Image: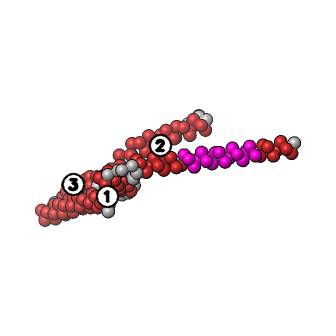
Amino acid sequence: SSAGDGVARGTRRRDKGRRRSRRSRRRRRRRASNAASAGRVGGGSALTTGASLFVSRFVRSVGLTLASIDRAPIRLKSLSIDHVFETHAQLAERISQHYQMQVVFEVYKILGSADILGNPVNLVSSLGTGVTSLFYEPALAMRESASLSSVGRGIARGALSAVKHSLAGALNTASKLTGTVSGGLG
C-alpha cells in the first residue's frame, strides 16, 4: 500500500508540473498575441503605434468621463400592493420587476447627466427654471398688488431670473464639454 501511495504521489506531481508548464506556455502566447495586436511586435509602423496609442487614450478618457455623472435627478415611483396573497418568492419577483422597470425608465436621466455630453439634463432644467420664473414672477406681482410698479418689478425679476438661469445652464454645459475635451487630450 505504501508503494502504491508513492506512485500515486509521483503521478500527481508530474501532472501538476505539466499543468504548470501548459499554463506558462499559454501565458507566453497570450502576451505575444497582445503585444502583436497592440502594434509593438512584428514591424508595426510608428503611425500604427501612434494611432493605437491615441485610440487607447481616447477610450480610457471617455470611460473615466462617462463615469462622471453630475446631479442625476433619479426618482423611482413607489409600489403599493393591497391585500397581498402571494408567496414570498412571488412577492419578491413582483417588487423586483417593478423597480427594474423604474430604473429602466430613469436611465435616460443618468446618461443625460454624464459630463461627456455636457450634462444636457441640467441644461434643460436650468432653461426650464428660467422660463418658469419669466412668467411666475410677474403673475405673483399682479396677484399681490395690482399697481403698475409692482408688476414692472415682477417682470424685471422674472427676466433677470430667466437670463441668469439660461446663462448658468449654457455655461455649465460648455464647461463640461471643454472639460471632456481637455481630459481626452491630457
Q: Residue at x 85, y 44 (%)?
A: 3
| Res. 52 mark | none
Question: Gap in Å between the C-alphas at discs 1 and 2?
Answer: 35 Å
Q: Quadrant of the N terminus?
A: top right
Closer-to-camera residue (186/64): 186
Q: Is residue 74 left or right of residue 125?
A: right
Identified by mark 1, the residue type is Gly
Q: Residue at x 39, y 42 (%)?
A: 105
Identified by mark 3, the residue type is Val
Identified by mark 2, the residue type is Tyr
| Res. 99 mark | 2
The percent coordinates of residue 76 (x first, y second) are: 43, 47
Quickly name the residue at label 3.
Answer: 131
Most extreme residue toward the left is 148
Q: Is residue 125 left or right of residue 22?
A: left
Disc 3 on helix, strand or loop?
Answer: helix
- Looking at the image, how many numbered discs can be counted on the residues? 3
The percent coordinates of residue 174 (x first, y second) are: 24, 59
Quickly name the residue at label 1.
Answer: 184
The percent coordinates of residue 186 (x first, y second) are: 32, 62
Q: Was residue 6 drawn as part of the magenta stretch in this picture? A: no
Question: Gap in Å between the C-alphas at discs 3 and 1?
Answer: 34 Å
Crowding around mark 3 (Cα neighbors within 10 Å: few <14, some 14 to 19, many 20+) is: some
Q: Quadrant of residue 179?
A: bottom left
User: What secondary structure characterizes most of the magenta part?
Assistant: helix
The percent coordinates of residue 58 (x first, y second) are: 33, 54
Crowding around mark 1 (Cα neighbors within 10 Å: few <14, some 14 to 19, many 20+) is: some
Question: Gap in Å between the C-alphas at discs 3 and 2?
Answer: 33 Å
Magenta range is 10-26
Mark 1 and mark 2 residues within 8 Å of each other at the beta carbon: no
